[in-house]
Image (cartoon, helix red, strand yellow):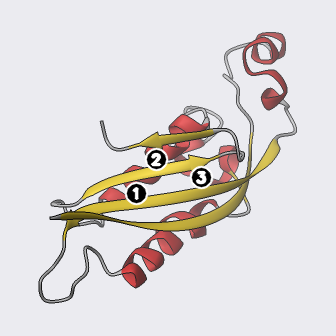
Amino acid sequence: MKVTVNRKAHFNAAHRLFKPDWSDEKNLEVFGLCSNPNYHGHNYDLTVAVTGEIDPDTGFVMDMKVLKDLIKTEIEDTFDHKNLNKEVVEFNDIDGLNPTAENIVVVIWNKLRAHINKNHELSVTLYETPRNFVNYSGN
């Protein structure tokens, strides 16, 4: 029997959506206000879901304290109160990924996947606003 455990987390971060080889006008046309050269911020909410068989010895799919600590060290410590374009290597201004919600959720998933039992499924949902959110499950 498979069960899914979920852990919520939160971080605040600034970013700018833009392509450095485009003009400011083109960036504004494509990314709108999110292309502000002075950046803008979000209060991101995150839900991490781990699905697997219940361990008959512990009764856990995954120890929630372990999941909590993993999210803290791998995600919150990396992203919270940071300028994603300047301070998170995956999104550096020169040749990094554009820090869209879609790219951020994939980076988060990859950071967590490396530390979670390979027999467990992992899904990450990232809320950029209460109404705008993305989900990634490694597919």
Residue 92 in the image, given as x and y percentages of width and height: 61, 42
Q: Which mark is residue 111?
A: 1
Of badges 2 and 3, the one in the foreground is: 2
Marks 1 and 2 in Cβ contact (< 8 Å): yes
- The Cα–Cα distance between marks 3 and 1, rounded to whole angstroms, is 12 Å
Helix, strand or loop for disc 2: helix
Q: Name the residue nearer the viewer: 44 or 77.
A: 44
Residue 29 is left or right of residue 6, and the answer is right
Q: In percent of the image, x 56 and y 49: which residue is there?
A: 126
Marks 2 and 3 in Cβ contact (< 8 Å): yes
| Residue at far left of view | 56
Q: Amino acid at mark 3?
A: Val
Disc 3: CA contacts within 10 A as few (<14), some (14-19) or many (>=20): some
- Decide if residue 58 is in sight here: yes
The C terminus sits in image quarter = top left
Residue labelled with disc 3: 88
Residue 107 in the image, given as x and y percentages of width and height: 46, 47
Q: Name the residue nearer the viewer: 19 or 58.
A: 58
Q: In percent of the image, x 32 and y 57: which residue is there?
A: 113
Q: Is residue 30 above or below residue 139?
A: above
Residue 32 is left or right of residue 61, and the answer is right
Residue 89 in the image, given as x and y percentages of width and height: 55, 49
Which callout, 2 or 3, points at the residue further toward the start of the chain? Answer: 3
Q: Is residue 24 above or below residue 115?
A: above
Marks 3 and 1 in Cβ contact (< 8 Å): no
